[in-house]
Amino acid sequence: MTRQKVTRRDFLKIGAAAGAVTLAGCAAPAAAPQQPTTAPAAPATGAEATTAPAAASAAGEIEYFTYDLGPANQSREEMRDAFQAANPEATVKVTVLPYGEMFQKIAALMAAGQPPDVMYGDFSLVRNALEGQLLDLTSYIKADPVLSDANQFTTNMQDDVQAKYGTSKIVALIMGTWVPILYYNKDLFDAAGAAYPTDDWTWEYAREAAKLLTKDDRSQFGVQLGTTFDNVGWMWWGQQPADFWATPQAFPETSNFNNETGVNVMKVYHDLTHVDKSAPTPDEASGYSNYAGPFGAGKAAMYSGGDWDAGWSFRELPFKWDMALTPKMRKDYRPALNTMVATNTIASASKNPDIAWNFIRFITATEDGQKLVGKGAYETPVLKGVAESDEVLKPDWAPAGYSARVKAASLPGPMFTPYPLNINLWEFPGKFLDPTVDNVRKGEMTPEQAVEFLDKEGQPYFAQQRKDTPPIP
Amino acid sequence: MQPSLPRPRKPWLTLRRREAIACALFIAPAVIGFVLFWVTPLVVSAYISLTDYALAGTPRFVGLENYRRLFDDDLFWQAVRVTLTYALIVVPMWIISSLTLALIMNQKLRGVAAFRTVYYLPAVLSGVATAMLWAWLFNYRSGLLNGLLSSLGLQGPNWLGDKNVALFSIILMSLWTMGWYLPIWLGGLQGIPTELYEAAEMDGANAWQRLFNVTLPMLSPVILYNLVINIIFATQLFTEPMMMTSGGPQFATLSYVLYLYNNAFSYLKMGQATAMAWLLFLFTLMLSALVFKFSPLWVYVESEKRG
């Protein structure tokens, strides 16, 4: 038997080759994204069409990133189970992450070429849309008999997505809507002998009620305004005539706060907090560590927030509460609008786009999927038959006014871009808007000074943002 | 002429070469790790600081534009102010308080080991968990601190909600971590030869004189080490403002690293964030170099030849 001699040079060559293979394995780019191969699912006809799960021919696994929705997380798991039951070849791995962390992780995974297949979300994926990292769903939606039929949905499945993402392509599938809501603590209203809010209230009504419900020792506030980011937008649009229809502008070139509308928005904050003192100052609100601050603690009679709160954190409130439409700015102005859409998107680099499409279609275009959206109660379903069913309008746990969210979502109007939103969703609010509104609430700025400041800072900011934004695909 | 005998071929693998190869193999893991996980990210981050990069898409080279924008950014300077204020107060505070504690813990007292453990405990607890715990203690309405003050008939401040108080609340909280330095101080203290104290006592030195003329000079290399480490820690303030105030109110607690983080992960401005990281690195390097440059004036090194 002869022994083959391995020279040192051979040994080094083998070692170098092994090292190179290892390094190449580590640095190998993600597999080329596959194009969807199956035709969009085409359910038969009529009512049956929406109950049938999407036809699925693909087998494999997809990962679904969703942010933490509290009790509604359960509905995501139920969506997965229902989809898998109808598509035994497909597996959906649901990954729940905290809100901010999810988008950071998506950004990092996108950069590494290994994004999750499906992403639940909001405006935070705009940059990914502009960079072509989200799958173009236009042909899918247009070829789908349910999704292409505008009459079946409470919102415009095409315009709203395009407005939201600023692209000419449809890069997301709407699964639900969000609207502003006025929550109120019935116990506090009863104790003060005040009439409950109604859907035709204006802010002047709300202001008077808030004064009545505020205690001088600051142990109880009449009203609490939720996130500045949301509320400024809602109040802005609440000042439009009833027939107003805007063309949302996803990437504005300038900020436009310094006008009558802007001053009126700031006046709401100024009057409630600084003049009437019926809303907590930022300092006072910071003392409440529970969700929704003083309202959640039972120390504020009203709360202007999003309808997601109802399904998420308000289910277990230790007092009697109810919901009404957000007050209008004036009687002849439009009420709260269908304001935001919750979407699912598919990564262009998804290795299983067919399964991903079938999954998001199942959530949006089937009765089963939409019922689970309604059950989760974090969003309002968009499929008309489901959105208007008793199952969605009157869940066991919800108060009588719960249907206000469906009523608001069904009002005609566009998904709005509340004020110059842009690629850096959180930068302008975080750096300029929130601190300015806080100054108004504290009385350190008048409404006029606030809007002047916002435009002074905002105009160069948005001009720069526009320059930095990639071309819209 | 006698034919010359062929000279024996010198083996390629000489002892010297064998040793060189062995040396290379032994240090290879460390060198590869250093190059892959330190040098490469450093070089890449230096390049990214010269680009417009939002994680999505490819970086676009913009030269020094990120640095220019930072210098024009009011919030950048606010973050610098907050961090410098914090560092200027916290670094001496950490050194004095932890050294004092170590001097006490270095005494032969009953149960001192238990005290050492208790004081060191915060160092092994998660920063996030302790920040949340302190956020509760500082809570304006229901926190323990204001509860205590209220029971004494005093109105407590809005510890984290008042822009004039919030940074000082975080500074106060930082005292909690002083036990981290305890083992280092104790190691230094216990390394001081006892004969020096005995000689000082024989010369009639009292406790203060022994502290200032024996303990502190002998401890000066440890003080130097702790000073440099403290400067680095203080300029990297992040977890507390992130968890307790998010940099508010009105940016009163917006630390440099928190703003860096916001730029990177909230605003997806990786170019500006890495530019900030490089500026922080250069600032810390410069400060440490200054400390080292002036250290011969006050740090006692035994092997040093003078004159």
Image (tube, rainbow, N blue to C red):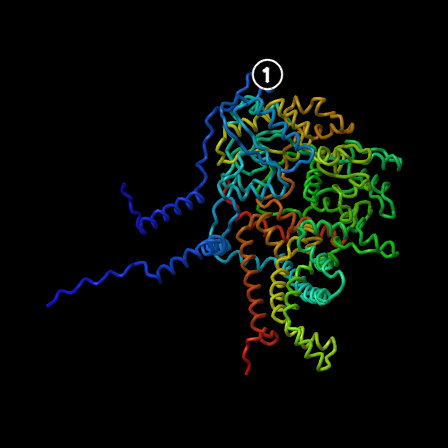
Q: Secondary structure at mark 1?
A: helix
- Residue type for callout 1: Gly
Q: Is residue A170 visible?
A: yes
Please tell me how crowded label 1 is: few (under 14), some (14-19), or many (20+) other residues with Cα within 10 Å.
Answer: few
Where residue A177 appears, as percent x and y from the top left, is 65, 32
Where residue B223 appears, as percent x and y from the top left, is 63, 68
**Which residue occupies 39% across, 44% down?**
A21
Outermost residue toward the front in this view: A1
Residue occupied by mark 1: A46
Figure check: B256 above or below A423: below
Which of the image's four quarters has the N terminus of chain A? top left
Outermost residue toward the left in this view: B1
* A338 or A386, nearer to the observer: A386
Q: Quadrant of residue A152?
A: top right
Figure check: A310 above or below B16: above
Where residue B260 appears, as percent x and y from the top left, is 59, 54
Q: Quadrant of residue A103?
A: top right
* A316 or A344, nearer to the observer: A316
Q: Is residue A453 visible?
A: no
Figure check: B248 above or below A56: below
* B37 or A63, nearer to the observer: B37
Q: Quadrant of residue A407?
A: top right
Q: Is residue A152 left or right of residue B8?
A: right
Q: Is residue A201 left or right of residue A159?
A: right
Q: Is residue B297 left or right of residue A134?
A: right
